[in-house]
Amino acid sequence: MSRLPIRLRVTAAFAVAMAAVLAALGFFLYARLDSHLQTELDTSLQVRADDLRALVGQRGSLEQSGGGLIEPGESFAQLVARDGRVLDATRPLRGAALLDAASIQRPTYENRPSVPGLNDPARLLAIPVPRGILVVGATRQNNLETLASFRNELLIAGPVALLLASLAGYFLAGLSLRQVETMRRRAAAISAETPGDRLPVPRTRDEVERLGSTLNEMLERLEAGLQRERDFVADAGHELRTPLALLRTELELALRHGRSEAELREALRGSVAEVDRLAQLADDLLLIARYDRGRLPLRVEDVDARSLLESVVSRFQWRADEASRPLASDAPPGLALRGDRLRLEQALGNLVDNALRYGRGRVSLAAVGVDGNVALQVEDEGDGFPDGFAGRAFERFSRAQHEGAGAGLGLAIVRVIAEAHGGSADLEGGSRIRLVLPSSPRGRGRRPEASPTRRPTA
């Protein structure tokens, strides 16, 4: 059944439902007609019994009753004494009593498959009278023939109506699915080479319209994702091209013009620097690619904020000393957060590297409690980001004018690591760079005040 087209399945389900409805309706109408005919027959018997009771009370004869009270072949009557003797009756019923007169105490109706002298099914009405029990009856053959005729009409009209309804259901299902088929054909023609194409959405305000709108929204998301992948590959290729070209130039110069050991060593040092840059760029690209696929591995644990900041300061202290730039950290004791220590050190290292490379003055790292979270902050005494750059500072391959040969991935990595931890990275007040991360349960008891805001460098 599941292999059949939807149109046929819908039609089959509609036909089954319609068959059940027609069967229930036919049964109901047949029962109502039967009840109506029996009520009409009972009323006729009651009227006839009233007239014959008056005749019996006047000692009249049932056999000679005329004037339409008894119709030969269709109705009959019998007067039975309480002791079972037949006192009077129409001609076919002068033999045995039709029923036990002693058991009749009130008007009683009864169906009989047949009566003596009358082979058709009959219905009896017995009513007490002063002389005994008056039994009035009539054949049910006319009613049975009417019911049989009505049943035959139902057996003919029902299947015809079911067939017509099924054909109508098949046609309507085709009309409903025509828009789906149109969308399917358009979807089959959409590819990466046809950006911007969308499915035709009928303005029907039903499930088909909602399906088309949802699929178009999905196509927009896929197209946006594909465009991001293309941009990512293009930017990565551009960024990889520069260090590779420099590395090739250094090696070619060493081969062609390197005459002394010192010149060769200098060429090798330049090559090693470019290789390091390539390795760092490859690591950054791999981290971003893993994050985009939802596969960035994290070893989440409780991390002491003070220890984390001190570790980052220790790594960059020699660079700060060479540049005569103060580098310090500040975190209250007991403040802890949940995260991957190595990834958090990487993010903070990128921020400190930017501050030492492009900023001025003192570089400060701080950790504060903010609304049940932990904010890790890095700032220096430089001028901060150039005008118009702050809004896109965390975008991939986004670089300020003074960033020189940087790949523009440092702040993007910071945001990726923060979001992978369920946190965020932003510019507090448009200047200070801040990572807001979930705190550790053991460090939520202390909520120190935030330090004054200072303007960071890019």
Image: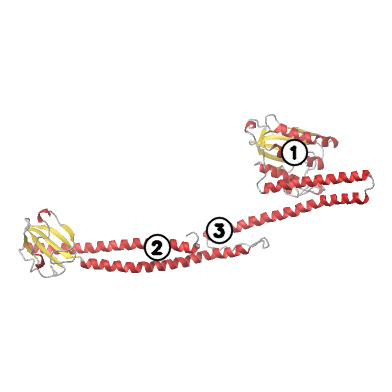
Kind of residue at disc 3: Leu
Q: Is residue 306 found left or right of 257 in the rendered image?
A: left
Quarter occupied by residue 58: bottom left
| Numbered circle sitting on residue 378 | 1
Q: Earlier in the sequence, mark 2 or mark 1?
A: 2
| Numbered circle sitting on residue 211 | 3
Q: Is residue 381 found left or right of 295 in the rendered image?
A: right
Task: Give the structural element (helix, strand or loop) at label 1.
Answer: strand
Mark 2 and mark 1: Cα distance apart in space: 73 Å
- Compared with 15, 347 (above or below) is above
**Residue at x-position 63% and y-position 64%:** 189
| Residue at which label 2 appears | 18
Q: Is residue 220 found left or right of 38 in the rendered image?
A: right
Residue lying furthest top in this view?
A: 333
Q: How is the image coloured?
A: secondary structure
Question: Camera-side residue: 409 or 401?
Answer: 409
